[in-house]
Image (cartoon, rainbow, N blue to C red):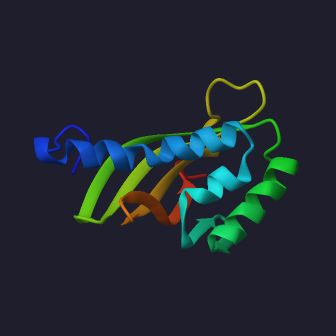
Amino acid sequence: MSLNSAPAKQNDELAAVTAVPQRIIDAWAGNDAEAFADVFAEDGTMALPGVFVKGREGVKNFMAAGYAGPYKGTRVYGEPIDVKFLGADSAVVVTLGGVLGKGETEIAEERKVRALWVLAKNDGEWQLAAYQNTPANAA
């Protein structure tokens, strides 16, 4: 479903799943690897160009190293552009965004990504079962 065509009965769930990217944005803003990893299911996966991480602990360790190194002083942004519910407890969110370098107010074209967020509801909370991104623009 597109973001503009959600039936009224799904508005609460739509708001809940589209809030997941914001949780990542907030964790990144605080350079908080633990809060970032807590968005993931215990066995969640993260696939980035050249990177595959499995499990919440692996995500936490990867992000902690990132915040201490190449991601230090950066922010991230992702705007949901599409949502598809696969059932009552699963959904896919597509975002367009990327990493903002220090002092940037817009994401550089070459760093924009489209991301797929596979979400599962566990104990009433939407968690990230799998995350994958790819460059938004062809080289």
Residue positioned 61% across, 52% down in the render: 139
Asked where in the image residue 5 lies, by quadrant, the reply is top left
Q: Position of residue 110 (x, y in %)?
A: 64, 43
Foreground of the two, 133 or 54: 54
Q: Can residue 70 be seen at all in this image of the molecule? A: no
Relative to 17, does residue 42 appear above or below in the rendering? below
Relative to 47, does residue 98 appear above or below in the rendering? above
Residue positioned 55% across, 62% down in the render: 40
Relative to 2, does residue 129 appear above or below in the rendering? below
Q: Position of residue 58 (x, y in %)?
A: 71, 70
Q: Is residue 73 left or right of residue 126?
A: right
Residue positioned 83% across, 57% down in the render: 65
Asked where in the image residue 30 lies, by quadrant, the reply is top right
Number of callouts in the render?
A: 0
Q: Position of residue 43 (x, y in %)?
A: 56, 76
Q: Can residue 95 be seen at all in this image of the molecule? A: yes
Name of the residue lying farthest toward the right: 69
Foreground of the two, 50 or 57: 57
Q: Is residue 44 left or right of residue 49?
A: left
Asked where in the image residue 76 lies, by quadrant, the reply is top right
Name of the residue lying farthest toward the front: 123
Foreground of the two, 115 or 127: 127
Q: Is residue 43 left or right of residue 129?
A: right
Residue positioned 63% across, 68% down in the render: 56
